Each structure stands twice: as structure tokens, then as C-alpha cells.
Amino acid sequence: MEKCTTTVSTCAEIAETIYDLQLQLPETSRWEVRPGQFVGLYPGSAARLLMRPISICTAIKPDRLRLVFRAGGPGTKELAGLRPGETVDVLGPLGNGYDVEMLAGGRVLLLGGGIGIPPMLGLARSLTAADAEVTAVLGYRNGELFLKDDFERAAAHVLIACEDGSTGVRGNVLDALRVAQEETAHEVPADAICACGPLPMLRAVRRYAAERKLPCFISLEERMACGVGACLGCVVRTRAVDGHSHVRNARICTEGPVFAAEDVEI
Ligand SMILES: Cc1cc2nc3c(=O)[nH]c(=O)nc-3n(C[C@H](O)[C@H](O)[C@H](O)COP(=O)(O)OP(=O)(O)OC[C@H]3O[C@@H](n4cnc5c(N)ncnc54)[C@H](O)[C@@H]3O)c2cc1C
Ligand code: FES
């Protein structure tokens, strides 16, 4: 992990308030990135000291990162204004990421909801390269289907759900799975599930996986401050007691953001 100053290659709005930010690392930096890891981006303004955690959508090369984020609050709005050639400080790669080796060769369902969609792209590419059969189910708010074309190249199958019903199945990722089952008379086959999205979606995905006894790995995108395990601002309750601290807590920024769904209380 390092903190370095990166140079913006591209920062483009690819859907309303959704930005595609590509960053060139310094010449001396070569990152080995696991899908599901994230970075801390530092807005330049002195009024916004805390880093903004953003998943690595894909590592285009060991020295070039692609991030896709929603500009919602002041920090991300400032980052959305970056222009090619400008610099931004980045801390990373952070967190644990998904275990691609364990999922290699299997049938893997990737479920991404809203701003949980971007980290699923790097995972889809890595799993496909590891001979997994990937079905990506993407849940959007509306018909602005950011990254859909990238997923169609990265995954064997892509299903779309849209909250406003303008494209694909009306509803969420689980509605898309239900409709696919009704249309084909069998469930979308899977040996494991990986998911990232809002908590209500992750809870429903965890139930879906438990009913089918499927291993399920979820990425938690909750509030963070330091990003490196020091402030305890990001803890999640765990089912097991930690042998070292004797409490049922894990830090999302260091022990996560990816957890086995049955290990955490969400
Ligand atoms: C591991 C991880 C990966 C993430 N990946 C993405 C991604 O790929 N794309 C994307 O659009 N968003 C992602 N998020 C959410 C993103 O970090 C927040 O939307 C963003 O930090 C909010 O900052 P702001 O300036 O818009 O809002 P502000 O309200 O100004 O944020 C104030 C402070 O609260 C923290 N904060 C507020 N909301 C969140 C949140 N949901 N998660 C974490 N910190 C928060 C900020 O870091 C900042 O320190 C991720 C979050 C985590 C934890
Ligand atoms: S954000 Fe500080 S410990 Fe996780």
C-alpha cells in the first residue's frame, strides 16, 4: 500500500452524476490489484481532509486505474471536476478483495446494484480469465446503463434490472433472476455468488444464497475515515469473536470490504 500523486488521464460523465475516472500512477509505482480492492482519493480542497473510498473498477495496466463513481456529496463532486493532466493524491490498493482462485472454473453469479456495479467489472474479467462462467446481473436506477457494454465483453451472460422499468426487468437484481427463471423454467445456475450494492440488496442476496446453500461473498461500501484500520470508523459486527481483540467486530477497510455473507451482521 502506498500514498502517491496520480495524474488524471480521463474524467468523463458516463451517466447522470456517474463519472469514469482514469488515473496514471507515478513511474515508480506498479500496483498488483485484486478485484474488490479500493483506493482512497483525496479531494484537493483543505475543507475536505478525509479520503473518499472508491473501488477499483479495473486496473487497466499495473500503473493505470479505472474508477467509476457517483458524484453525490461535496468531495466526490470536487473529484468529478478533475481534468486530464491534473493531479490527485491516492492511497492504495486497500482492503482484501475477492478470492478469484477459489472461484476459478465455477459458475459465478455477480450481482451489482447501483454504484456497486463498477467493482464487479474487474471481477468479471478476472473470473472469465480464470475459466469461470460468469453471469453478471446489474441493477440500475434508470435506463442510463453505465458499463453495460464492458460487462457484455467480460461476462458470458448479462441480465439487466432497472428500478424505473425503462429497460430490462422492472425492479432489482433478484427480480431479474426471478424473471430469468420464469422464462427458462430453471434457475440461473450458480456455484457461488459475489455481490456489491446497497445493504437491503445485500441482505436479500444473502437470503437467496442461504436458501440455495451457495457460498456468497459481499462487498460492504460503508462510511470510512482513515481507510487503513486506525480509526475504527468502519466496523461491522461479525458472527465470530475475534481471537485477538475478543470482540465481534471487523474493520471493513482492512478485514474487508469483501466478507463471506454468513460471517457478518448486516
Ligand atoms: C470500500 C468502498 C468502496 C466504494 N466504492 C465506490 C465506488 O466504486 N463508486 C462510488 O460511487 N462510491 C463508492 N463508495 C462510496 C463512496 O465512498 C461514497 O459515496 C463517498 O465517500 C461519499 O463522499 P462524498 O464526498 O460524496 O460525500 P460526503 O458526504 O462529503 O462524505 C463525507 C465523508 O463521509 C464518508 N462517506 C460518506 N458516504 C460514504 C459511503 N457510502 N461510503 C464510504 N464513505 C462515505 C466520505 O468518505 C467522507 O469522508 C465506496 C465506499 C467504500 C467504503
Ligand atoms: S476507516 Fe478507519 S479503521 Fe476503517
Image (cartoon, grey):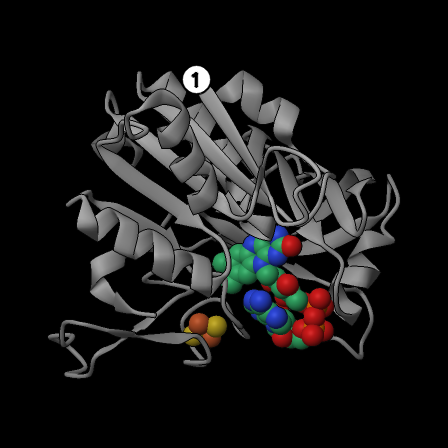
Please state the horizontal and vertical placement of residue 35, each as a whole percent of the image: 43, 39
Residue 58 is left or right of residue 257, and the answer is right
Q: Residue at x 56, y 20 (%)?
A: 152
Figure quadrant, ligand 2: bottom left
Front residue of this view, candidates 241 and 92: 241
Vertical arrangement, residue 265 with respect to residue 55, above or below: below
Residue 203 is left or right of residue 239, and the answer is right
Query: Type of residue at label 1?
Result: Ala
Q: Is residue 91 visible?
A: no
Q: Residue at x 16, y 74 (%)?
A: 242
Q: Residue at x 79, y 70 (%)?
A: 74
What is the total number of numbered labels drawn onto the structure image?
1
Please state the horizontal and vertical placement of residue 172, each as a whole percent of the image: 51, 48
Front residue of this view, candidates 99 and 132: 132
Q: Residue at x 82, y 71 (%)?
A: 45
Q: Is residue 27 visible?
A: yes
| Residue 192, picture quadrant | top left
Residue 233 is left or right of residue 259, and the answer is right
Crowding near the residue tagged with mark 1, few <14, some 14–19, many ≥20 C-alpha atoms within 10 Å: some
Q: Secondary structure at mark 1?
A: loop
Q: What residue is shown with label 1? A: 156
Front residue of this view, candidates 92 and 79: 79
